[in-house]
Image (tube, grey):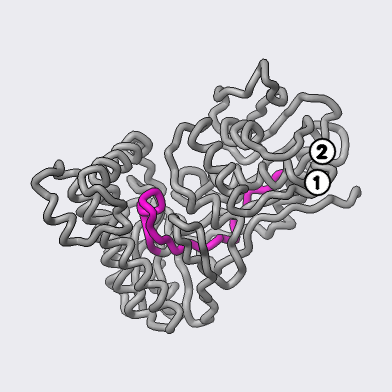
Amino acid sequence: VQRCPPLEELVSSASDIFRSNFKIEPTHCAFAPGRVNLIGEHVDYCDGFVLPMALPMYTVVVASQSGNSSCTVIAASLPKEETAHFSLPTSQEPLVPGDPFWSNYVKGVVANFPGSLCGFNAVVVSSVPIGAGLSSSAALEVATFCMLESLMESPLQVSTVEKALCCQRAEHHFAKVPCGIMDQFIAFMGQQDNALLLDCRSLEARQVPLIDPSVSVLIIDSNVKHKLCQGEYAKRRSDCEGAITLLGKSLRDATQKEVQDHKEQMTAEQFAAAHHVVTEIRRTTTAAQALESGNLVEFGRLMAESHASLRDDFRVSCTEVDMLVELCLSIKGVYGSRMTGAGFGGCTVTLLNTEVLQRVIDHIEKNYKGSPTFYVCKPSHGAAFHHLTPK
């Protein structure tokens, strides 16, 4: 099982790298968590409901003011450390996307930040796996936002919802990924020992306790990353939008019968996408109720249904992830298992009785053809920032 380094360890590591590169002490620290979505996949951009939880995996940014308009950001957790340089945007010279690609998440937040800006030097360290479907991009965006907020002289008078929307705009306009709002929202709003039921239409949310010590959340990274993911993500979103146009209403408000009645007017891909979204929205609200009432068997059944829909209707799973789900579900004491994230590789999430955890891991290591990574996680807290005390 992969160890998740404590937050203090990540801050210490980032601070050491900062001192080594900038020859001064960092003055501020901000962090944001990764997330796993328990159920409610590919519905956040269709007015649906999602049920993510924040993970004890963090992206940490330590920083200090540069004293001018220049910004230098060192990404220390990539296979090879990389540095990005840019200047604060002006009306004559706005920030634009560019290389290195990861810096677009930072620059996008700077460009959309609703408060006063100052130049900065920063180091980014992260324990959120990149490309695993655990939202490393949103963790970087939200940590960057919190770092900028920490450097302000007076508090930022902006709601948490607007902060999340700012980070979403960064991903839309600079990384060119048409993501929904879930990832940024849970990064800000996560609470320890709780999942979050988020209404992606109204952006209202409620905490859903997940504190039973006899229950564990097992995340398995397949370590498979299929390159077609980003273009296929946009295609699935386009299929949903086409179905919405033909239905004349949001998929949130559509029934399975209405989708069926419009089948002849839709392409096969639009119909399958709409069927997934309409059923997944219902599954998610039902699953939240099951979790709140302690009905883990029902919650697990809905997780398995969700995976089948993502595999067969939305077509975003892959052979390796399907195998991980099947291996998990074959062990008694596993309540449910499904793919999580955008798809085409990445991770599965499994809810299980803690007593069978090692049995599941042994079973997968014996029968899975790849090289998986295992994480056992409890719901963690959301983003924050604070001043650093000089050494």
- Give the magenta range: 39-61
The answer to whether one can see residue 279 in this image is: yes
Residue furthest toward the front?
248
- Image height check: is 156 above or below 366? above
Residue furthest toward the left?
264
Asked whether 7 or 30 is in front, the reply is 30
Residue 190 coordinates in the image, percent (x, y): 59, 62
Left or right: 95, with 130 as reference point = right
Disc number for residue 28: 1
Identify which residue is drawn at 55% across, 71% down: 194
User: Looking at the image, is mark 2 or mark 1 earlier in the sequence?
Assistant: 1
Which quadrant of the figure has residue 98?
top right
Identify which residue is drawn at 73% across, 29% down: 72
User: Please, what secondary structure does the residue beneath circle 1 have?
Assistant: strand
Magenta residue check for 48: yes
Residue 357 coordinates in the image, percent (x, y): 44, 73
Query: In the rendered image, which residue does mark 2 sit on?
Result: 64
Left or right: 197, with 379 as reference point = left
Residue 87 coordinates in the image, percent (x, y): 71, 23
